[in-house]
């Protein structure tokens, strides 16, 4: 006699549905956690850098005899401790030359009837707005009329000096997309092919970005080629950064996004100048690629290339370092996949299907 024991799958339906339910819950929760994590990281990094912009050691010039300069410096430091890094100049012409060379972000020459404030709007909105407001009050207290001398005025197409920041964001997103697509579609290409394609893309990005900034926005009239060079150099740097993170595989992609987007925006100086960032960003923002490209574009577009050496050096060093990481990563993977990799088992001959005699 046979006993019908039934189907086990019908006997315990709850036990089978439980794992499926847990897997479905995990699938639904993952995008929520990832999205919230991105929100928290972006808001935390950008917010801690820019939520309360205050100047710290902003290079600024005072015109006058040493005793008068020292007295005014003490008064300013009492009102805003460590806000300004004061340099004394003997006359207005020397101070104006220092502002034009971006040795200082402004200079103030007091006078009994008329005071002069020298600024460089092309260096960014944060320094200009701060010194204009601060020394407008100083002149008013002294009973003199303030005359503002802008040595780097902005064109009508870029009244807030923000187009450099837009160029940064556009080049950053384009670089991320380019390198991620290359990783999944052509990662088997050699190092030379990657370098050549990346350089070609960077040049095209520079030409396109500068063309839009110049012809569409009228932001950089007469400075097309210098701006093209800055955008192209940054684009190649950003592509190299993503490629360097991709050495560790797919997990490197979100790390590269974190590096270039929230961290890059926070340190860029596009919305808030690096001298106005909170700590620790204030200490190292000058050496971040995003800050270098914004400062570099403003320099070549509005300041005749003043102080452009540091941005160029920063972008070049980042590019060389990241290309070196990519080359070393490919070399190590090649060795691991060669002599050090597993040897495939020999293929067995197919069994004969002929009947035995």
Image: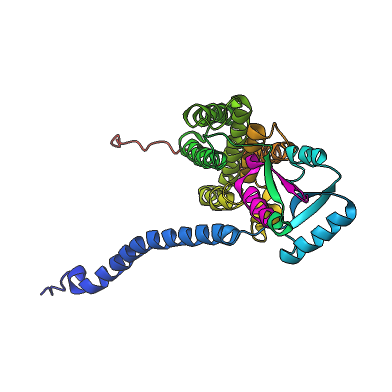
* Magenta stretch contains residue 131: yes
The answer to which of 29 and 111 lies nearer the viewer is: 111
Q: Picture coordinates of residue 116 (x, y %)?
A: 73, 45
From this viewpoint, which residue is outermost toward the left?
Answer: 1
**Residue 255 visible in the current orientation:** yes
Quadrant including the C terminus: top left
Residue 10 is left or right of residue 332, and the answer is left
For the magenta stretch, what is the residue range?
Answer: 108-137
Residue at x 74% of width, y 41% of height: 99
Q: Picture coordinates of residue 192 (x, y %)?
A: 61, 28
Quadrant including the N terminus: bottom left
The answer to which of 129 and 331 lies nearer the viewer is: 129
The answer to which of 72 and 180 lies nearer the viewer is: 72
Give the vertical position of 89 relative to 280 (above or below): above
How many numbered discs, if any?
A: 0
Residue 306 is left or right of residue 187, and the answer is right
Residue at x 66% of width, y 53% of height: 136
Q: Picture coordinates of residue 39 (x, y %)?
A: 46, 59
Residue at x 29% of width, y 65% of height: 20
Residue at x 17% of width, y 70% of height: 10
């Amino acid at each position: 006699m046979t006993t019908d024991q039934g189907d086990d799958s019908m006997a315990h339906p709850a036990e089978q549905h439980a794992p499926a339910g847990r897997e479905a819950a995990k699938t639904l929760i993952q995008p929520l956690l990832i999205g919230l994590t991105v929100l928290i990281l972006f808001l935390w990094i950008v917010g801690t850098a820019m939520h309360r912009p205050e100047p710290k050691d902003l290079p600024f010039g005072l015109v006058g005899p040493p005793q008068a300069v020292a007295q005014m410096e003490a008064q300013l430091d009492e009102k805003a401790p460590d806000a300004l890094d004061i340099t004394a100049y003997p006359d207005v012409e020397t101070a104006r030359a220092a502002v034009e060379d971006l040795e200082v972000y402004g200079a103030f020459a007091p006078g009994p009837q008329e005071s002069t404030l020298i600024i460089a709007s092309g260096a960014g909105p944060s320094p200009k707005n701060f010194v204009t407001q601060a020394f407008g009050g100083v002149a008013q207290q002294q009973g003199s009329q303030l005359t503002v001398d802008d040595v780097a005025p902005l064109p009508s197409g870029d009244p807030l000096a923000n187009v450099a920041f837009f160029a940064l964001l556009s080049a950053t997103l384009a670089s991320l997309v380019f390198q991620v697509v290359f990783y999944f579609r052509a990662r088997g290409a050699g190092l030379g092919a990657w370098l050549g394609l990346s350089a070609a893309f960077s040049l095209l990005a520079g030409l396109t970005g500068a063309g839009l900034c110049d012809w569409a926005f009228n932001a950089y009239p007469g400075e097309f080629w210098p701006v093209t060079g800055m955008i192209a150099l940054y684009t190649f740097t950003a592509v190299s950064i993503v490629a360097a993170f991709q050495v560790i595989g797919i997990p490197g992609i979100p790390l590269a996004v974190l590096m270039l987007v929230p961290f890059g925006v926070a340190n860029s100086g596009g919305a808030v100048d690096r001298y106005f960032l909170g700590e620790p960003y204030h200490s190292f923002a000058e050496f971040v690629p995003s800050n270098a490209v914004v400062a570099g574009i403003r320099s070549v577009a509005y300041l005749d290339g003043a102080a452009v050496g540091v941005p160029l050096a920063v972008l070049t060093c980042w590019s060389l370092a990241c290309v070196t990481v990519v080359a070393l990563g490919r070399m190590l993977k090649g060795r691991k996949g060669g002599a050090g990799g597993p040897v495939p088992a020999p293929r067995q001959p197919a069994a004969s299907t002929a009947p035995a005699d």
